[in-house]
Amino acid sequence: MWSGPRNLSTALMYAFGNRGDMTCVDEPFYGPYLRLTGLDHPMRDEIIASRPESPVEVEQNLISDQHAYHKHMCQHMIDGIPRGFMEHCVNVFLIRHPARVVASFTKEYPQATAADIGFAAQVELYDHVLALGRTPVVIDSADIRADPRAMLTALCDAIGLDFTDRMLSWPAGPKPYDGVWAPVWYASVHASTGFAGPEGPLPDLTGHAADLTAEALPYYEKMAARKITANF
């Protein structure tokens, strides 16, 4: 799963983790990404210590596990991070309106840049998958929250899995496959036992957050034109 938003992508990871027939891998390139960029993200030292592998070692581990759910952040896929494993995966892209992503991300990281939220990277990765001769899948977080059962059924159909009701709920609290950064980013997901209901109006943003949203919007709109829908 390729994502810009963290909370909904984490909820989806929990949904797939609760199926009982696959393992979950949470942002495997986060440590290498921080080492390569030098960025000062929350819990930087802990993240790097928890992800000591080189980018190549991470890729080898991903390829070796043939039945796993990988949660990736698009912005992590910079120069120096390998992409060969993508040819061996079913690639799903989770999108969310940039106003919501920016509002959420800047609460914990107010100096966020366009590169940090990953919208341009998401489009570039989508095009990369197409160039590999693969068929990527796009799903919108707003659609999932509006009707989780219908959209997860549509997602499973699109990627060749049987839907199960186990995907609609999970136990509250941390999960054993959470990244070490979970205390910073996952509080609301840890409090949940299923997908939240439909989202309200878009947040009213100003200043840097509004500019960041405007920069990301064309990329979101390009991906939204390709999203799957459910047969309601």
Image: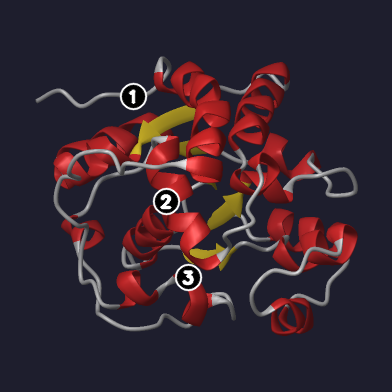
Q: Nearer the viewer, residue 156 or 75?
A: 75
* Amino acid type, residue under disc 2 in the picture: Ala
Q: Residue at x 56, y 37 (%)?
A: 212
Q: Nearer the viewer, residue 212 or 178?
A: 212
Q: Earlier in the sequence, mark 3 or mark 1?
A: 3
**Residue receiving disc 3:** 185
Taking 11 as reference, is 148 left or right?
Answer: left
Q: Residue at x 76, y 82 (%)?
A: 45
Q: Residue at x 69, y 69 (%)?
A: 41
Report, in whole angstroms, how far the alpha carbon at label 3 lies from the one at label 2. Answer: 13 Å
User: Up-down: is 149 above or below 43?
Assistant: above
Q: Nearer the viewer, mark 3 or mark 2?
A: 2
The quarter of the image holding the C terminus is: top left
* Amino acid type, residue under disc 3 in the picture: Trp
Q: Nearer the viewer, residue 134 or 145?
A: 145
Callout 2: SS: helix
**Residue receiving disc 1:** 228
Q: Earlier in the sequence, mark 3 or mark 2?
A: 2
- Does any portion of residue 205 appear in the rendered image? yes
Residue 208 in the image: state x and y as whole percent: 56, 43
Q: Which mark is residue 103?
A: 2
Residue 8 in the image: state x and y as whole percent: 37, 54
Report, in whole angstroms, how far the alpha carbon at label 2 lies from the one at label 1. Answer: 25 Å
- Does any portion of residue 177 appear in the rendered image? no
Crowdedness near tag 3: few (<14), some (14–19) or many (≥20) residues, C-alpha within 10 Å? some
Q: Which image quarter: residue 124?
A: top right
Q: Earlier in the sequence, mark 2 or mark 1?
A: 2
> In the orientation shown, which residue stands out farthest toward the left?
232
Residue 96 in the image: state x and y as whole percent: 40, 38
Report, in whole angstroms, how far the alpha carbon at label 3 lies from the one at label 1. Answer: 27 Å
